[in-house]
Amino acid sequence: MSAIDLNADLGETVDGAPTADDAAMFAVISSASIACGGHAGDAASMRDAVARAAAHGVAVGAHPSYPDRAGFGRVRPALGAGDLRESVAAQLHALVAAGADVRYVKPHGALYHAVRDDTAQAAAVVAAVAALSERVGRAVPILGLDGAISRAAASAGLPFRREAFLDRGYLASGALVPRGDRDALLDDPVVVAARAVRLALTGEVEAVDGAVVTTGAVSLCLHGDSPGSVAMAHAVRAALDEAGVAVAAPW
């Protein structure tokens, strides 16, 4: 039987208020990328998310970002590599302090995209993950898109795992359509479920111009704060089940 991971960005509370229906999403996914204070989340939300993950047998990943709570981590600040490394390391430490057994690290928002192209920023994130790996006594994988971050991870001896997005539009280059642009977001459960099956079986996704992008993804992401995320998640699980694809964490 084929298998694929289904991850969602959760624990993203803002001023104590959740941005997603975490309880419903935890019941469907196999991995949760938990906000650890950079763009959203706090000590209480991290503890709650870790407990929910344990209750549902969901793997916990850290979801660090630029320190940008005002912009929800979607604005890239003028932050040097040294400061970025310290910020990411502090976020990872906060999630561990909340009781998490961190199985992977996935950068969030603007940081996710920056480390695909920016060698210095990618190296800073990898250095923070390497420090976490040394602390926990095992190599912690990094989840993302190929680029500077995957090369930096390889140089540091850290596993890199590729993901694909179920609810975001793709460009022919393999990059995501920028938020705010036409076709950036998908919200039709039928379309998203069909995309999940194709990705699980072939690793391919269709870009907005019709080009076929090969992702090599081992994990599929649904954003918890996307419109209709719970309905999409249930549709994805049903479609994968029907296609004979198991949903399981690879960490």
Image (cartoon, rainbow, N blue to C red):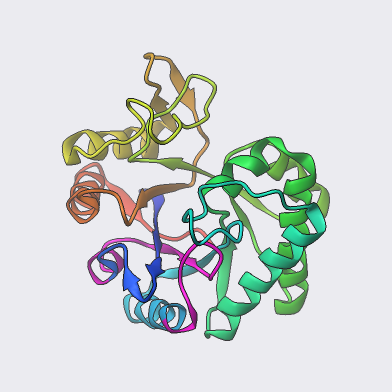
Q: Nearer the viewer, residue 210 or 63?
A: 63
Q: Is residue 68 visible?
A: yes
For the magenta stretch, what is the residue range?
23-44
- Residue 14 location, x and y as percent? 39, 68
Count of picture labels:
0
Is 162 part of what is drawn in magenta? no
Residue 28 highlighted magenta (yes or no): yes
Q: Is residue 40 above or below residue 216?
A: below
Is residue 138 shown left or right of residue 237?
A: right
Residue 242 versus residue 12 in the image, above or below: above
Question: Do we see residue 11 in this rendering?
Answer: no
Left or right: where does residue 69 sit relative to residue 236?
A: right
Q: Residue at x 68, y 54 (%)?
A: 159
Q: Residue at x 77, y 55 (%)?
A: 124
Kindly identify the residue that appears in the image at 38 percent across and 75 percent down: 53
Q: Residue at x 63, y 58 (%)?
A: 141
For residue 23, above or below residue 1: below
Q: Quadrant of the C terminus?
A: bottom right
Residue 3's x, y, as percent?
A: 39, 50
| Image location of residue 147, percent across then percent down | 67, 36
**Residue 45 occupies quadrant:** bottom left
Residue closest to the eye, 81 or 194: 81
